[in-house]
Image (tube, grey):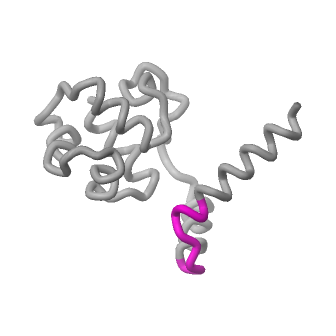
Amino acid sequence: MIGKRIQQLRLARGLSLSELAERADIAKSYLSAIERNIQGNPSIQVIEKLASVLNVSIQALLGEESSDTPISLDPDWMDLAKEAMNSGVSKEQFREWLEFQRWRIDKEGK
């Protein structure tokens, strides 16, 4: 079950297996085994790394909360993401923009 959830989150964030493995500092083969439910009991350290990279709580990764888990992506969001990619916006630039927007919204709310 955790493998399927990791795979869904990875794909929703547009990460390849290699990218997630590299960012989480775990072996690609190990991540693949987790996603395919061959390795069904990853260590808490691996779970923490994956949750951090996927930007979800450990509880969401374990399936104990569902609010962080995308079920499907709205087609308009897909189009917007494709437009950003085609215009040369890097993932890092997009993440920085999102972080700024969260900060701005937080400041306005206080």
Start-end of magenta stretch: 86-94
Would residue 60 be found to the left or right of residue 50 on screen? right
Q: Quadrant of residue 106?
A: top right
* Residue 89 covered by magenta stretch: yes
Question: Along the line of sight, which residue is nearer the eye, 91 or 80?
Answer: 91
Q: Position of residue 98 (x, y in %)?
A: 66, 53
* Residue 2 covered by magenta stretch: no
Q: Position of residue 89 (x, y in %)?
A: 58, 73
Residue that appears at 26% across and 36% down: 3
Residue that appears at 54% across and 79% down: 86
Q: Position of residue 40 (x, y in %)?
A: 17, 28
Task: Name the image quarter holding the N terminus.
Answer: top left
Question: Along the line of sight, which residue is nearer the eye, 74 or 14?
Answer: 14
Q: Quadrant of residue 109?
A: top right
Q: Position of residue 24 (x, y in %)?
A: 33, 45
Task: Determine the residue located farthest toward the front in the rendered image.
Answer: 25
Task: Name the image quarter holding the C terminus.
Answer: top right
Residue that appears at 42% across and 44% down: 53
Residue 77's place in the image compared with 21, above or below, is below
Task: Determine the residue located farthest toward the bottom in the rendered image.
Answer: 87
Task: Determine the residue located farthest toward the left in the rendered image.
Answer: 38
